[in-house]
Each structure stands twice: as structure tokens, then as C-alpha cells.
């Protein structure tokens, strides 16, 4: 029988890769806690939380039991005309823990689709009010909101990964990303670009979409919470909805349960995903206010025009309920604060390296920004040789470990980053 890697290369297309790629792929045999084991027996400390979702680590007994117990009842049931306890419980919990007045929950099966739902929701809301011109969106440069077509249209059009599709995408409005750093006040100059677009085009803008405080895959930038406060005020002034994309930041990653809390603001629509199920199953949700849901429901066609097949999958909802309960009943704030402290202590040594442009840490996110893009063909194996799993992109080497990571393992991650980055060419 051919090896797993030979069979993989013959027919599997990996994310953001070529079928002719020479980039290494590492076969995983199992995962437990903050480690996973490769097929050859190598153990790696996970610094990525499997793209930021496995906040409780792997093979967690509580989450395993949630899936097993639900599986014995039903693995899936359509959500059209039917409902079930895991979905209702999850919706109730999300309403309880997210900023008020978000009180209506629409489930989907991925973060990108949650953003699509949010955008459709905003357009349909304005259409229900007879404002059919409000069809476009405002987004921050350096932003990332997903890979489907609507989501791609609000990702950064220049530095983003979707420029190939530019001629096929709806043309949206883009404003300069705020340069005011997290913890600093926001000035009028930071808001100038947004204010200008809203002043000139608010009659055709349905919503402003932002990643609160942390811009993720578009650049791992942290910006002032004060910008969100003033953006919320501008949206209210110009009659534009505010969509918060909390898919990466939700469930404690930034040090608050939701990043909007840094600014003490509530969006009109919020998207959550990734850590929602603790990384066990794909699930996302879009929350909105009763004002928006009722306006859509009370006007033609009287229904919201979306309905994923696997919407509110019972097993996904069950494990999401268990994951949220596990998080809220833990000292997660203390854990994230401790991760922040160790990341800062370990990564700040990279500031002295000539290869490094910047080092920044917020909550359980640590970023080393390089002056030149990394070579994935060489840097990925270098991290594996150090016994860690770190997946850089572009000029960014970053860590988003599971919240259960120990101080010792976290130091091993930061030490590996320092060693590998030190070995790179200037």
C-alpha cells in the first residue's frame, strides 16, 4: 500500500496550496492536550490551537462525552420546521453572554458563512425598510472576513489573499485601518477615512464590518478600542449598521470574552465561530437584535433568505454548549492573562533581532512581524525540529496556543520562535 503522504499528494488539495506544491505536509496520528503526535512518533506542542479554535486542547474528556452522549440520541436532524434542545440551549447561552441587545441567533456551519449571513441580514433589513440602495459595505484595510464571495468582497483588496477574484466581487468601500495602537486613544485623523466614506456614501451603505480590536489573518494588528467606540457613534449618526466579526476573537482570545467588550460597545450584528465548539466540529452563528430580526420578519418576503443544510447540527451544538460551560466555569481570564505575560516575556527578545519589524502581544495572541516574508518550505520543518507546531504566514510568525497550555510548554513555544527567527536571513 502506498504511504499516507503519497496518497495525500495524489488526490488531496490542501488549503492555500498547489497540487504541485513542494511544501512539507506532516501526517498526524493522534492529538491530546496541547500536543499532537505525528505518524513517525514525533510529538509537537501546538502553538496554533488548530487555527485558533481548540482553546481546550485536544481529546478533552468533557467535550468527548458531549459528542458521545449526543451521538446516541441523534447525529443530525434538519432545522427547517424542527428544533432540538442543544440548539435552543446554545442560542440561549449566546444571547446571555454576548453584548446586549443581541438576542436573536442564526446558526451556520462556518465562519465565512456566518459573515455571508450577516451581510445578507443587513441588506435584507434595509430592504424591508424600503431603503433598497443600501447594498454595499465598509471594511477596514488589512481586514480578513473569510473565503466565500461575500466575505471576500470585504477583505483587504490589495494585501489580501483574494485579489485574483477582484473583477468578480462586489465593489465595497475600504477605509484606512486605524494606526492608533491598543491601549492608546483614537484621534480624529484615525477616523478621517471612515468619516469621509460615511459622509459621502451612507445612503448606499448597509453596514460597517470590523474585526474588533484584533485584525486577524489580514495582518495580526491590534488597534485602539477607542476606535470602536467612535465607529459605533459614526454608524449611529449616519444610519449604518455595525457588524462585529468575532470569529477569531470570540471566547476569550483577546482577554475579554468578546473583543467588543474592550470598547464596551454592542454591534447590531455579531459573527462567532472557530472556538465556539472548542475546535471539535464546524459551527458558527450570527447574532442580531430583535429590531433587525423583527423588521425582516414583518416585511416582504417575511422570511430571512438563508438556510444551511447542516445548520444547528445537534452534535456541534452539544459540544459547543459543553465548551462554553467549560470555559466559563474555569479561571479563563487568569489563564489568558498568564499566557499574555509569558508570551510577552518570551517574544520580546525577538525585538533585538535585525530580521524583526515588530513584536506585539494581546491576551493569548503573540505576534512577531518580520521585515521579509517567510519561506514556508524551510521555516515549517524548522519549527517541527524544535518540537512545536507554528504555522507562519507572510511576514508573520505568531502564537495562539490553547488556553490549557502550561508555563513550561508556553516557554518552549516562545523559545522555538526566538531560535527559528534568529536563524532566518536578515
Image (spheres, rainbow, N blue to C red):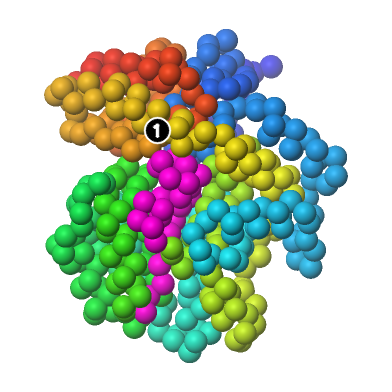
Left or right, residue 357 beside residue 276? left
Determine the image quadrant of residue 234: bottom left
The crowd level at tag 1 (other Cα within 10 Å; few <14, some 14-19, many 20+) is some
Tell me where residue 117 appears, x and y as whole percent: 54, 64
Quarter of the picture containing the C terminus is top left
Along the line of sight, which residue is nearer the eye, 410 or 108?
Answer: 410
Query: Can residue 396 be seen by looking at this rendering?
Result: no
Residue at the spot 24% in from the left edge and 80% down from the top edge: 200
Tell me where residue 124 appears, x and y as whole percent: 52, 77
Tell me where residue 226 appears, x and y as whole percent: 27, 57
Position of residue 320 relative to residue 288, above or below, is above
Along the line of sight, which residue is nearer the eye, 362 or 357?
Answer: 362
Query: Can residue 132 be seen by looking at this rendering?
Result: yes
Position of residue 150 relative to residue 361, above or below, is below
Region in magenta: 239-265
Determine the image quadrant of residue 344: top left
Residue at the spot 62% in from the left edge and 74% down from the top edge: 304
**Is residue 255 on the magenta stretch?**
yes
Q: Which residue is mark 1?
A: 337
Along the line of sight, which residue is nearer the eye, 181 or 386?
Answer: 181
- The residue most toward the top is 41
Position of residue 16 relative to residue 197, above or below, is above
Label 1: state its secondary structure: helix
Position of residue 207 relative to residue 404, above or below, is below
Residue at the spot 48% in from the left edge and 89% down from the top edge: 130
Amino acid at each position: 500500500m502506498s504511504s499516507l503522504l503519497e496518497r495525500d499528494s495524489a488526490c488531496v488539495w490542501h488549503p492555500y496550496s498547489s497540487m504541485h506544491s513542494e511544501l512539507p505536509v506532516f501526517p498526524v496520528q493522534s492529538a491530546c492536550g496541547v500536543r499532537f503526535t505525528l505518524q513517525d512518533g514525533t510529538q509537537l506542542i501546538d502553538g496554533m490551537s488548530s487555527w485558533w479554535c481548540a482553546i481546550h486542547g485536544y481529546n478533552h474528556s468533557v467535550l468527548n462525552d458531549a459528542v458521545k452522549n449526543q451521538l446516541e440520541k441523534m447525529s443530525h436532524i434538519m432545522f427547517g420546521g424542527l428544533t432540538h434542545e442543544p440548539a435552543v440551549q446554545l442560542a440561549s447561552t449566546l444571547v446571555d453572554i454576548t453584548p446586549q441587545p443581541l438576542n436573536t441567533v442564526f446558526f451556520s456551519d462556518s465562519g465565512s458563512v456566518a459573515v455571508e449571513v450577516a451581510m445578507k441580514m443587513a441588506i435584507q433589513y434595509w430592504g424591508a425598510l424600503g431603503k433598497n440602495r443600501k447594498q454595499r459595505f465598509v471594511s477596514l484595510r488589512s481586514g480578513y472576513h473569510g473565503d466565500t464571495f461575500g466575505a471576500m468582497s470585504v477583505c483587504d483588496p490589495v494585501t489580501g489573499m483574494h485579489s485574483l477574484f477582484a473583477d468578480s466581487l462586489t465593489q465595497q468601500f475600504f477605509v484606512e485601518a486605524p494606526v492608533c495602537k491598543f491601549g492608546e486613544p483614537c484621534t480624529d485623523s484615525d477616523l478621517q477615512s471612515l468619516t469621509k466614506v460615511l459622509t459621502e456614501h451612507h445612503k448606499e451603505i448597509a453596514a460597517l464590518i470590523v474585526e474588533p480590536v484584533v485584525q486577524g489573518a489580514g495582518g495580526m494588528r491590534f488597534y485602539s478600542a477607542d476606535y470602536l467606540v467612535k465607529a459605533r457613534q459614526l454608524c449611529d449618526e449616519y444610519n449604518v449598521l455595525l457588524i462585529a466579526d468575532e470569529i477569531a476573537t470570540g471566547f476569550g482570545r483577546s482577554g475579554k470574552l468578546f473583543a467588543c467588550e474592550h470598547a464596551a460597545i454592542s454591534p447590531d450584528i455579531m459573527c462567532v465561530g472557530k472556538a465556539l465548539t472548542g475546535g471539535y466540529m464546524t459551527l458558527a452563528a450570527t447574532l442580531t437584535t430583535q429590531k433587525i430580526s423583527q423588521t425582516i420578519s414583518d416585511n416582504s418576503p417575511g422570511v430571512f433568505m438563508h438556510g444551511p443544510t447542516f445548520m444547528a447540527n445537534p452534535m456541534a451544538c452539544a459540544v459547543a454548549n459543553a465548551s462554553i460551560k467549560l470555559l466559563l466555569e474555569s479561571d479563563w481570564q487568569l489563564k489568558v492573562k498568564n499566557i499574555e505575560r509569558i508570551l510577552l516575556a518570551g517574544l520580546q527578545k525577538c525585538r533585538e533581532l535585525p530580521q524583526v519589524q515588530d513584536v506585539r502581544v494581546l491576551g493569548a495572541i503573540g505576534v512577531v512581524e518580520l521585515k521579509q516574508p517567510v519561506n514556508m518550505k524551510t521555516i515549517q520543518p524548522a519549527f517541527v525540529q524544535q518540537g512545536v507546531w507554528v504555522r507562519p504566514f507572510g511576514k508573520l510568525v505568531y502564537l495562539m496556543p490553547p488556553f490549557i497550555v502550561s508555563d513550561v510548554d508556553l516557554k518552549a513555544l516562545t523559545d522555538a520562535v526566538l531560535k527559528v527567527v534568529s536563524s532566518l536571513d536578515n
